[in-house]
Amino acid sequence: MQYGYFDNDRREYVITDPRTPMPWANYLGSPAYGAIVTQNAGGYSFVQSGAAGRILRYTFNQFDEPGRYIYLRDEADGDFWSASWRPVEKPLDQYRTVTRHGTAYTQIESGYRGIESRALYYVPLDATHEVWRLEIKNTGDTKRRIGVFGYAEFTTESFYTQDLVNMQYTQFITVTEFHRDHILQRINQFCDLNADGENGRERFFGLAGAPVCSYTGRRERFLGVHRFHEPQALLNGKLDDTVNFNGNPCGALHTVIDLAPGESKTVVFLLGQKGEKEARALLDRYQDAGKTVDQEWRALIAYWHGKLNNLFVQTPDEDLNTMVNTWNAFQCYITFIWSRAASLIYAGERNGYGYRDTVQDIQGIIHLDPEMAKERIRFMLSAQVHHGAGLPLVKFNHRPGHEDTPEQDSYVKSTGHPHYRADDAMWLFPTVYKYVAETGDRDFLSEVIPFADCDEGTVIEHLRRAIDFTMHHLGAHGMPAGLHADWNDCLQLGAQGESSFVAFQFYLALKKLDELLPDQPEYREYKSWLNETAKDMLEKINRYFWEEDRFLRGYTQEGAIIGSKRDSEAAMWLNPQSWGVISGAATREQAEKSMESVHSLLNTPNGIELMAPCYKRHYFNGAAMKLFNPNTKENGGIFCQTQGWAILAEALLGHGGRAFEYFKESCPSAYNDRAEIREVEPYVHSQFIEGHETPQPGRAHVHWLTGTASTVMVGMVEGILGLRPTPDGLCISPAIPAAWDGFTMEKTFRGKRLHITVDNSAHHEGGVRKLLVNGRAVDAGVLTDDKIVDGDEITVVM
Ligand code: GLC
């Protein structure tokens, strides 16, 4: 089944059939004022926190209601419909609709009985209110009179669970008022008032561009007994001019528009958490409806497209182009900005950034926006405890230098995290390295940044302490301990148990730090310690973690091996194999063998399973994934984040065909015409895909906010496309299907725009035979800054 298509020129996904298996969503605004909207106009809005700042009600797990509804009504005969297919659901042979999900805006275009409407939803850049612009056109040859009704269902109070379940309280704390062109909602109307008589909890829903003909602030008066698909207000043709006192508030406004044949008109609904004065000022600003919106929308597009343009690729594969140029990149920004804050799956209760998630998310945007990345790297370094570990959860209002830590009850109480993870601070190494490599900004390494609880140090000092933390947490064989979790949240190996994943991360960390440290006398001793330790680790990895054709996953607290081919369950794991390669610890022979085992034992048509066979009966105590159904999430599901590492590992080995195969099998857009398999949006990665043993292999879950975005992006950019910056310059070494003749890339690198052509007329899978700058041959290694200027034509001959 196909429900839509990619309009790559406009960087939009266009939904042509609204009956998608799940609501297909888009993101508007930022967590300062965030909004999620689907093709049914479903979704919610919030200020600062999805859980604690909810202003539009949304019922989780209850299909796709309510939403930002705009109803249209033919005043001549009372027939009514909605600007999005739902809620009214007119028959689709009479009602034509497409939804254009773009970069931080969504436009729903519909046509019914000679009336065309375009409802544009967005949050202006840097603003904390949202706009619903409705353009309505009479395409027929008779005059029409159309009633327009906007409906916003306010929460009774900002904390969403209170709103939904604590009704003996929340139904009695709020009122609505009507002011000429808007409904104003007040909460606890006589409490905490400032000089203007307000308390900051006011919300408004207003109309600009046309007069309000009738209104209500009472949800039940709008809906009556029939609910969203047949509201009483639409049956009546007008609202009853009531406001809310106790019960459910809403903002509902009605206007009437006369349209001559061919004529179109525009009105604007505005929504936000604003008091009367601010609401008034905003509504005045939008009286010219069309103009203000056009400017804001153009600015929004310019902002996002400008960011995405920093890398533009044209390969023979449309999916790759679509994902790398637009959708995977946009998703990387969304996960970077929103973390795991709010979606149709995450309610927004996690009050902060997960350490590993965020440090990984940063990697997804470094190639597009190193400055934005740098700021967040600083922030995450400031969330490292003085002994080197990362705080498991970094509060949104994190106070560097003054934070409590998992050692203290207060931190545990406010975050629910009593333990450190073995991997959290290890992610800093590839992330800091990528930033320095992308920018050449080595000065960053000597910038002084506070630790989370006390003390401060240069970036190098932060990295050294991360190394110290691991060195102070070694298990029974002297390998990095698994602690409460490594990357895998469900793998509790304990203080004596050991994780091969962290061992590979640690090995990589030692190597990267050595590469970053300047060759200066003050570092000589430390650098040789780094190299000695790396050698020792490598020797132990080979002694304790290698088994014939695979790397083991680890040792339990009790010393049992996890991931041996002799095990009846969980005998083969993906991550140790891909990380063996990524870390550089695997020999060529180990790499070839172990990645081949991945292909033969874990690969499916929809992606690579995390491990196999999944746990059913023979699990150990610390295997929390036993809670999940087989082939689901960490219990042997296709955990999509790890697909990115497999792509990268194969590409680093020069196996372009295999890397591309892995990209394609879990690539959302590649399922566009088989969307019933994945069910979720074909334009964004999901957290996991069901493995081969479930009733619906290939079904994907947990959309948008997932680490998959960044790892697959890194796998594509550094792996397949082969753009691998080093602190000295740019190294380009693609790994692509042998069948490709080549491809082109436009990349902004250290302020220079480079036009890169990859010539694969020899039909290789990897390896660079010749490198030319403006037609002149240069060393086929790193393109140092002195070899390239803005506008250079670079040719890579494979
Ligand atoms: C989820 C978590 C992430 C973890 C992964 C594997 O995606 O957000 O932190 O690494 O699961 O357990």
Image (spheres, helix red, strand yellow):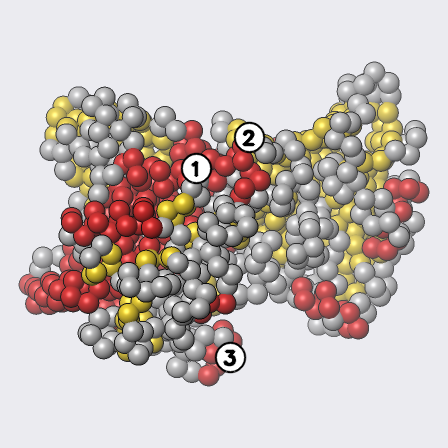
The single residue placed furthest to the bottom in the displayed view is 409
**Residues at circles 3 and 1 in contact by the CB criterion of under 8 Å:** no
- Where does label 1 land, which residue? 323
Percent x, y of residue 222 = 86, 50
Location of residue 232 with respect to 51 vertically, above or below: above
- Where does label 2 land, which residue? 5
User: Earlier along the polypeptide chain: callout 2 or callout 1?
Assistant: 2
- Where does label 3 land, which residue? 413
What's the distance in space between the residues labelled 3 and 1, CA to CA? Answer: 41 Å
Which quarter of the image is occupied by the N terminus? top right
Which quarter of the image is occupied by the C terminus? top left
SS class, disc 3: helix
Residue 507 vs residue 498, the one in the foreground: 498
Q: Is residue 104 left or right of residue 558?
A: right
SS class, disc 1: helix
Q: Local crowd at mark 3 within 10 Å, few (<14), some, or many (≥20)?
A: few
Q: Local crowd at mark 1 within 10 Å, few (<14), some, or many (≥20)?
A: many
Q: Which residue is pictured at 37% across the width and 44% down the height?
A: 713
